[in-house]
Amino acid sequence: MARIDGRANDELRPVSIALGYQAFAEGSALIELGQTKVLCAVSVDDKVPAFLKGESSGWVTAEYAMLPRSTHTRTPRRILPDSSAGRSQEIQRLIGRALRAVTDLRALGERTFTVDCDVLQADGGTRTAAITGGYVALYHALYNLKRQGVLKLMPLRNAVAATSVGVVLGEKLLDLCYEEDSRAGVDFNVVMTDAGQFVEIQGTAEGKPFSKETVDALLLLAQLGIKRLFEAQKAAVAILR
């Protein structure tokens, strides 16, 4: 099966990560994966949620939204916090879990790091792009605070990145664009650390159930793709050193 954009089955879309895309955020990054573009920006507050008060721990959370014309048709703008769609809530919880998995929360002090992930353009893989770009934005914010003497060390244990894999017309594919994702019989989102550990695996059969052999093959494909994403992350933050 020839892919719509001519890629090999195990090939990522062209990826770029621009560090410091926004001037006023504590940390920011714009990630582009093919036609998918997600702007990630970090804000720091000197307070923590009520359940962490007095616990000598910080917090990392995320918010996710799609701009009205990030897709082919207009997505209504969400105004009130409680009007967020269920899909957005699920995705932002995923992003938060992924980033907390590699962060030493106690080293943050009683501070909350909010990672805003805004989809400027969507062509599949927005949640995985948000995790990959969100890590770079968080790294940028933490680096800036360490340089200012606010933090004594970089409180990141590992890097974290994510990609999608799936089965389309019997072919196992890496980094699905929207056209492929909409036709996938099996669809996975995989989140990993650069230590080779899994943070989260979301896998779904759209019709026919899949085998363990399919799971193993898709996870191996995801690992190969995420390894390349780690290289893109390292290149993005290299200018800070």
Image (spheres, rainbow, N blue to C red):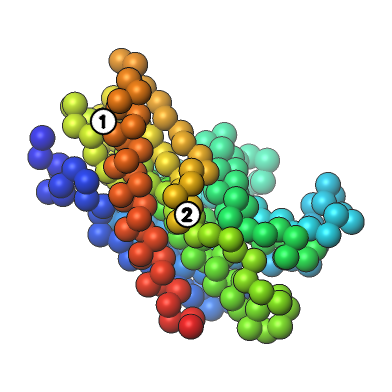
Q: Which residue is mark 1?
A: 167
Query: Amino acid type of disc 1?
Result: Val
Which mark, by number, is residue 210?
none
Q: Which residue is mark 2?
A: 195
Residue drawn at x 48%, y 46% is 197
- Seen in the image, is 27 located left or right of residue 206? right
Label 1: few (<14), some (14–19) or many (≥20) C-alpha neighbours in 10 Å: many
Residue drawn at x 30%, y 15% is 208
The residue at the far right in this view is: 54
x, y (%) of residue 193? 48, 52
Of the 4 image quadrants, the one containing the N terminus is: top left
State which quadrant residue 132 falls in. bottom left
Q: Secondary structure at mark 1?
A: strand
The residue at the far left in this view is: 2
x, y (%) of residue 35? 29, 55
- 207 w.r.t. 147: above or below: above
Res 27 visible? no
Q: Nearer the viewer, residue 226 or 60?
A: 226
- 166 w.r.t. 137: above or below: above
- 230 w.r.t. 125: above or below: below
x, y (%) of residue 115? 59, 59
Q: Earlier in the sequence, mark 1 or mark 2?
A: 1
Residue drawn at x 83%, y 59% is 56
Q: Secondary structure at mark 2?
A: loop
Q: CA distance from mark 1 to mark 2?
A: 26 Å
The mark lying in front, picked from 1 and 2, is: 2
The residue at the far top in this view is: 208
x, y (%) of residue 40? 50, 62
Badge count: 2
Query: Amino acid type of disc 2?
Result: Ala
